Image (cartoon, rainbow, N blue to C red):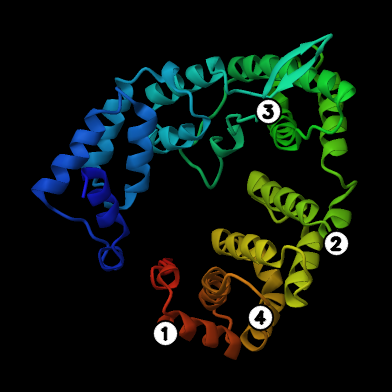
Amino acid sequence: MTSTEYLYYIAQNKYLKKNKFKLSSIRLDKQIKEIINKIPENPEIYLFILGNIDDILTKENQDEILKSLLKTDLNIIKNERVWHVIVYFANGNKLLCNRIKTAIIKNDKLWDTGILSISDSGISYGQYNFIELQNLRKNNHRKNGLFWTSNEAVKIFEKLQIAMNKIKEVKQRKNDINFESILEEMYQFVLDEENKINQSYNYLVVQKELKKLFFSDRKYSNLYEGLVSNDKTVVILSLAEVFSDIYRTNKLIHKEEIKLILNKIVFQKEPSVEAALSHVSNMIWDFRKNESFKVFSMQLIEILKKYENEELIEYDKPFVQEKLIKIAMVLNYWEINDESVLYWINNRKESIYNNIKNLIDITV
């Protein structure tokens, strides 16, 4: 077993997880420190390893990672997914966060459209893999996320315009290429940072053009149309839009759309029932301390009752049961008494599935 495999084994050991395993071992400590010290050599590899074993890292380890990151040249980062790990381990450190923001603004993956070239002879393009700024942004769920200054936001906006114009040109020539994900990210950025960039040249024009491009690519004119579609891809995209808006604003918005989604789950109306259940369960879990979400209590109880007596056809049983149990745990946390809640709470205790056995209790 390699050092990395050993660390993964420790991190995934369900007994140790259950007992909050703050381990003390010379071998373990040495291997973790070796990985931390190697961060400047290859930050992408070693940060992903540390991210995967986060449960066994001590406060001392966290401090050492921060020190190692401060010695790392962030301009060498190529993998767009590693930024959220870097931001996590930065833990709000002002100096490191400023370096992160500077590196991101310079990074080729900022607004990477996948467009390689546009010429009279044709268009060359590949898969686009962009930095998801929304997943790095400071909000109520990410207290130590990044906060862009006006100057930084303007620089990002300027690069956004260049990328948007490339997409616009490609769409005019070849409209079957889908840029929905990056267009949504762009559109969300201009809305979130409006107060910092609205004095920029062309702001209103860019916002209008982005909206036009995004809504033409998403294949549905409004959320209701998307949610009731028989096209699985359209339903998945509309679900993502509803819940990303809720997390972005940290408010109970799209109330009617959520009721529609809850009915979809109750009546097991395909496509994408599992995806809908997952989104709802995660939302209820994450916003359990927000009193306004209690308005869905009765519909949530209906879901628990339905799935107690009638399972889905050809579904991922451990996954679905975990989502139902998390709903029951939140209803129990809200002190809502119902036999269906008790049924799923007991199901958790008796489950044979590791993902359910390893669920963390709700803390006040």
Residue 185 horizontal side relative to residue 98, left or right: right
When the figure is inspected, residue 163 is found, relative to residue 56, above or below; the finding is: above
The residue labelled by disc 2 is 228
Q: Quadrant of the C terminus?
A: bottom left
Check the image and report above or below for 200 versus 302. Answer: above
Q: List the residue tagged with mark 4.
A: 301
Which of the numbered marks, if any, corresponds to residue 350? 1
What's the residue type where badge 1 is placed?
Glu
Gap in angstroms between the C-alphas marked 4 and 2: 22 Å
- The residue type indicated by label 3 comes to Glu
Helix, strand or loop at disc 2?
loop
Mark 2 or mark 3, whichever is nearer to me: 2
Q: Which of 139 and 175 is in front in this view?
A: 175
Decide which of 3, 347 is in the foreground and name it. 3
**Which of marks 2 and 4 precedes in the sequence?**
2
Query: Of circles 4 and 2, which is in front?
Result: 2
Label for residue 90?
A: none
